[in-house]
Structures are given as structure tokens and as C-alpha cells.
Amino acid sequence: MTNRQAILPLAAAISLSASLSTAQETNGTTQVAAFNMDPLVVTSTLGVETVSESLSSVTVIDSKDLQQRNPRGLGDVLQAQPGINVTSSGSFGKNTSVFTRGTSSESTILLLDGIRIRSATTGGAPWQYIPPQLLQRIEVVRGPKGTLYGSDAVGGVIQGFTTPRDEQDQQWIEMGGGSFSTQQFTGGVSGQSGDTRYSLQGHYLDTDGTNLQPGGEDKGFRNAAGTLSVSHRFDNGASLGVVGLQSSGNTEFFGGETDFDMRTLGVKASTPVVRNWTTSIQLSEARDEQDNERAAGPSFFDTVSRTARWENTFRFENHELIAGTEYRVDDVDSSEPYEEDSRSNKAAFAQLLSEFGAASLQLSGRWDDNEAFGEETTGAVALGYDLSPVYSARVSYGTAFRAPTFNDLYYPGFGDPNLEPETSGTVEVGLRSDRESVFWDVALFRTDVDNLISAQPENIERARIDGLELSGGVSMSNFEVTSAVTFQDPEDRSTGNRLQRRSKRSVRIDADYTPANYHLGASFIAEGDRYNDPQNSEVLAGFGRLDLRAGMDVTRLLSLSVSVDNVFDRRYSTTSRSFTPEFDYLAAGRAVYATISYGAK
């Protein structure tokens, strides 16, 4: 297609991370702009496009954002982004859930370098064990993506990339510490030798943590993690790449502790067949292993997902067709006697992208056949129109489904083998404006869900989520600010109650001033109240928090930074313990951290 073909030479700038996910690999480089108003994305279409070209609602958090904000956890990065609610059972490595557009926490897919990560037993992603210090960029795609990624992409897809976009050789090391006896070390090296690119990173965090309930003991967290990627491009345009991540450690919680080990490994080979046809094969494995120590005794839950994916991309003038197949096997090994401990899913999918002057069209469909619950078919259509060189409009409709997890179906004394998959349909209308130094985006959506799977678990007959997302950004000289406001109404239509643990409104503002060799910044995050239970009897109050940060480049390679999180020391809660003893899980209060960095990243 005309616009996409024009930016294809920039695809390599997304780095090996994208090449091992869904991006098409091409030659070329690009430098990270100081403030990129229209960044490239790969998650929303299995190919390369800019945010303004996308017919989905997309937010990109780049390496500069991550470095300046220096977050403690991935949940801090995602909190109150457009359409996003994050809840956790306390700070520092405690159970974290991400709700996208009011859908369930299991209805948002997490990808790392194109590899899906989740526990097959709970269905949720281990957000709390992914160090944001190892991520170079994050793409948040909102809206149903079941036609591209299969089960569970009801609310959206969040993908993190671990490899630097810059092809120049880089080496860096960071050391820091602060409140709650927190110590943190991060380092890495990346570069290119001939046609081979490589990246290696390591991260270590150790903290005493903070109390989860008033008067309670501090609960600590330790995490050692690393990433490795290597790719090679051959003279004929073919490429071969390997990427992997491991994160392991220990987290303490009320009544026990967990030793965790999370690992991913992916291999992707891609080659042009003829001038307009490229084919690729990706093999990947993701492991989630947890050993728990509780008063009731020890337990373990080890899950592994193995996936084989074949994609073919055909380009003809203003049209691009992607078609492929996927096969995934989930296996469970547990101290609990599950009735079933393995299931497979096979799928076929296709997507057509076309441009007709100022108009663009996206059609996609997918067929899944799951060993546990049978066949599901999903489809989506999206239309876009450039109203002017500055304004663009989009409208879309898509279906998706979420498969019951092993816990939903088979957990002894808890699961229900008669659960049905939940199915959904979402309609969205959006308007975006992109100028040289200002952008804004408005999205209005409605999602209807049948057989919504609740935490009990049981099927809720009908649920409806109406929402409005407002986001924007401005860059003036050395000052940059981005903001997001979300209004949503996630309703159980059978009772009229709000869906559990979803907030109806949120706001986030990130502002940074970066003159010469230092920077000053602030983030304000606020969310409205939520209910901890489906009956809406346990209310958790809303909250607002302010984070401040400052940094200075001492030399070209040496820099210092300091941050103050939760400046006004607000001890708020986003989830509660509902069984004896009952209490609200407290987020950390005011905390101060300092970091020294050496090298280029």
C-alpha cells in the first residue's frame, strides 16, 4: 500500500524484537526522536505502520519515556494509560492485573518480542515479574484483536520489545537504590557485526518492600532477569533470529511467599519467496513456574505454552494480504490434581489491508479449533479516511473470544467444566489530529460480551462496556507533555452492577522539561473508585498520586537521576482480601530513589 510501502525501509528500526514478533524485516535505520509525535507500531496489523495510519487505538511508550520515568514496575508504566486500569495486591512484585477497556484481566494479551506470556492455569500474564528496565518500547493496542492473536484478545494487546532500535554499538550500566532498602542494578550491551545484530541485558532488584495492611510486616521482593537476542540477515534478504528472556526470584505476600521462574525463547526465520511474497516461521516457548509456601502447605504450578506460527505476506500495489496458521499446546504440571493437564489449539487467519486514495480498509478473520471447547470464528472490519493532511477518522467492528482457563474448568473444588467461552463484539469510532508538535486522539467504543467469565468462575449472561478515551501530547521547545483521560461504564447487564475491580474514570498527565544537560519531570495519576466484589458491596476509594523526577548529564556518558514517588504519601488500595482476615491491600507510600548511569542506552 502506498503509505506503508513508503515506510517499509524503516521496519528494521523496530529492531530484532519486532522481527521476532509480527513486523516484516527490511533494511535501514532510524534514530529515536526527542519527541516522536507519530511513531511506528507493529502490533496492531502484523506489519509496520505509523500510529496515525493505524485503524486501532494505539499508545506507544518509547525508551526515552521509560528512562526518564524510571518506573519500579510494569504496572506503574501502564497505570491510567488510555483505557487501562491496573490493580495489585500491594507494591513490589505482588499479584498485578491489567484491565483494558473494562474487560477482564485475562482478556488482555501480553507479548514480549512476539512471544505470548501467561499462566495457563490462571490465564493472567505475570505483569509484576517483567522489569520495565529491560524494555526499550511498549505498544498498547486497544480493542479486539482476536482475528490476529486468537483467544483472550478481547480488550487489547500489550507488547514489549527488549532490543534497542539504534543499530549503533551501545554499552551501559545503572546502579540505584532508595526507600524500603531497595537496590537495583541494570546493564547491557548491543551492537552489530557485519549483518549480525546482538543484544544482551541484565537486571537485578532487591527490596524489603512495604506493609500490605496497616500495622503489618514488610513484604519483600527479589528479581534477577535478563534478555538475549541475536539476528542475522543473509544476502538474499532472508533472516534468522533468536530472542529469549528469563525472570526469576522471590516475592513475599500475606501468609506466605512464592519462588517464580519465567522464561521465553523464540526462533524466527523469514525469507522472500518472490518479489511480492515473504514467508516466515516462528517457533516459541513460554514457561511460567511458581513454587508457593503457605501456612496450609507447599504447592507448585508450572505451565508451558509451545507455539508454531507460519505467516505469509503478499503485497500488490496498494494492497497487502497476510495469511497464516498457528498451533499452540498448553501443558500444566501442578501439585493440584487437575482433571485435564494439556490442551491444544490450531488456527488459521488472514488479514487484508488496502488503500483507496484517502480511504483505507482492513478486513481480518480467524478460525480457532480448541481441544477443550471446540471451534470459534472471529472477524473484524475497519475503515479509515483522511479528512485532511491533519485530521483522520476511523470506524471499526470486531469480534473476539476468551477461552476458559485450566483453573476455570478443572481446579479441584472450584472449576466448572461446563463453562462456555465468552464472546464479544466491539464497535469503535475515532478521530485523530497530527500536527508538527501537537497530536490528539478521541475514541468512543461499545463492547457487548456474552457469557463473560467471572472470577467465581461462572458465566455472566450479558455485559456491556461503554467508553470514551481522550489522549494528546504537545512539544514546545524543551517542554513535553502527554495526557490521557478515560471514561467507561463496565456493567453486568443481568444485575446492573459495575464489573468487579473496574474504575469508571482515570486521568494521567506526564510532563517533562529537558533543557541542555538536565531534565525535570512530573506524573499525575488518578483513578475513581471501584468495587472489589461483583455485588458492589465492598467499595475501594479512588486515589490521586503525584510523582516527581529530576536528572542531570554530568558528562556525555555519566548521568544522575532522582525520583520521588507518591509525593503526598497516599496509601491507597486497588484490591482487597475478601476472606478472613479481610483487609485492603495497600500500595506503597512516599518513596525516594536515586540512580547513577554510565554509558549509552
Image (cartoon, rainbow, N blue to C red):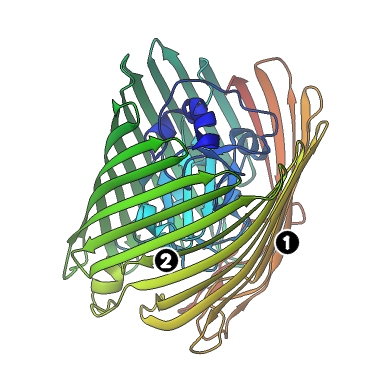
Dot 1, how many residues are within 10 Å of its Cα: few (below 14), some (14-19), or many (20+)? some
| Number of on-image labels | 2
Return the residue found at the far top: 194
Vertical relation: 252 (above or below) 549: below
Amino acid identity at mark 2: Thr
Instruction: Judge from the rendering whether residue 98 lies leftward or rightward of residue 433; answer left or right.
Output: left
Q: Which residue is mark 2?
A: 399
Q: Earlier in the sequence, mark 2 or mark 1?
A: 2
The answer to whether one can see residue 231 in this image is: yes
Q: Label 2 vs label 1: CA separation?
A: 34 Å
Instruction: Judge from the rendering whether residue 406 lies leftward or rightward of residue 154; answer left or right.
Output: left
Res 544 label: 1
- Please state which of the two labelled residues, at mark 2 or mark 1, is closer to the viewer: 2
Vertical relation: 315 (above or below) 490: above
Res 553 label: none
Image quadrant where residue 61 sits: top right
Dot 2, how many residues are within 10 Å of its Cα: few (below 14), some (14-19), or many (20+)? many
Q: Residue at x 39, y 32 (%)?
A: 19
Q: Secondary structure at mark 1?
A: strand
Which quadrant is the C terminus positioned in? top right
Please provide percent x and percent y for residue 585.
56, 67
Return the residue found at the far bottom: 495
Q: Secondary structure at mark 2?
A: strand
Vertical relation: 211 (above or below) 325: below
Please provide percent x and percent y for residue 169.
51, 15
20 or 544, which lies in front?
Answer: 20
